[in-house]
Image: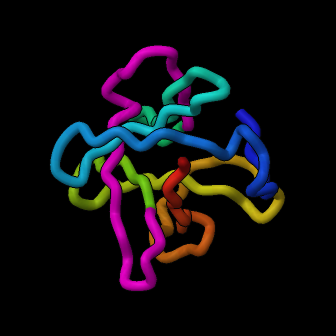
């Protein structure tokens, strides 16, 4: 999976679907895939909604969103995009790489 820093790209559009309290799925509309994090912390995609694709959505005090998978109270992996645009998971929840801005699409 590749990422992009181009916010106008059609591949940056994800549908957020609530599946419970603070739990969401991210569905890439153009690719037709869900994105998630497996139990080893790897980024995965799937055409169907699998448990790895159900992520905890967090909203910080600056109104940035983060999407994480919690495996235990001390083991948390979050979706991240590196400065080069590479998609990865991160255990550093305070990193700017895990902060996303969500906006409403018409």
Along the viewing direction, whichever of 15 and 104 lies nearer the viewer: 104
Horizontal side of residue 33 vs 26, given as left or right: right
Figure check: 20 above or below 75: above
Residue 12 in magenta stretch? no
Residue 35, image x, y percentages: 51, 34
**Which residue is nearer to you in this view: 8 or 85?**
8
Q: How is the image coloured?
A: rainbow
Q: Please check the rendered image and state whether residue 61 is part of the magenta-colored stretch, yes or no.
A: yes
Q: Residue at x 52, y 60 (%)?
A: 103
Work out which quarter of the rendered image holds the N terminus and state it: top right
* Range of magenta residues: 43-65
Q: Residue 79, how many percent across, how many down?
A: 52, 51
Q: Give percent across and percent down for residue 78.
A: 46, 55
Q: Is residue 95 left or right of residue 81?
A: left
Total numbered labels placed on residues in the image? 0
The relative height of residue 45 versus residue 65 in the rendered view (above or below) is above
Residue that sits furthest to the top in the current view? 47
Residue plotted at (62% across, 43% down): 13
Query: Can you name the residue that lies furthest to the left here?
Result: 21
Residue sticking out furthest to the front: 106
- Write the residue at 74% across / 45% down: 3
Please tell me whether residue 54 is drawn above or below residue 74 in the rendered image: above
Q: Residue at 56%, 37% (x, y): give it.
A: 43
Q: Is residue 61 above or below residue 31?
A: below
In the rendering, at what x and y percent does residue 18 appear? 28, 42
């Amino acid at each position: 999976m590749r990422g992009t820093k181009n916010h106008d790209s059609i591949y940056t559009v994800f549908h957020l679907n609530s599946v419970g309290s603070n739990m969401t799925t991210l569905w890439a509309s153009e690719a037709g895939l869900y994105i998630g994090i497996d139990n080893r912390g790897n980024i995965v995609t799937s055409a169907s909604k699998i448990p790895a694709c159900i992520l905890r959505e967090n909203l910080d005090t600056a109104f940035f969103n983060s999407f994480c998978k919690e495996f235990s109270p001390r083991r948390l992996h979050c979706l991240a995009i590196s400065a080069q645009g590479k998609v990865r998971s991160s255990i550093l929840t305070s990193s700017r790489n895990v902060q996303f801005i969500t906006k409403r699409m018409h």
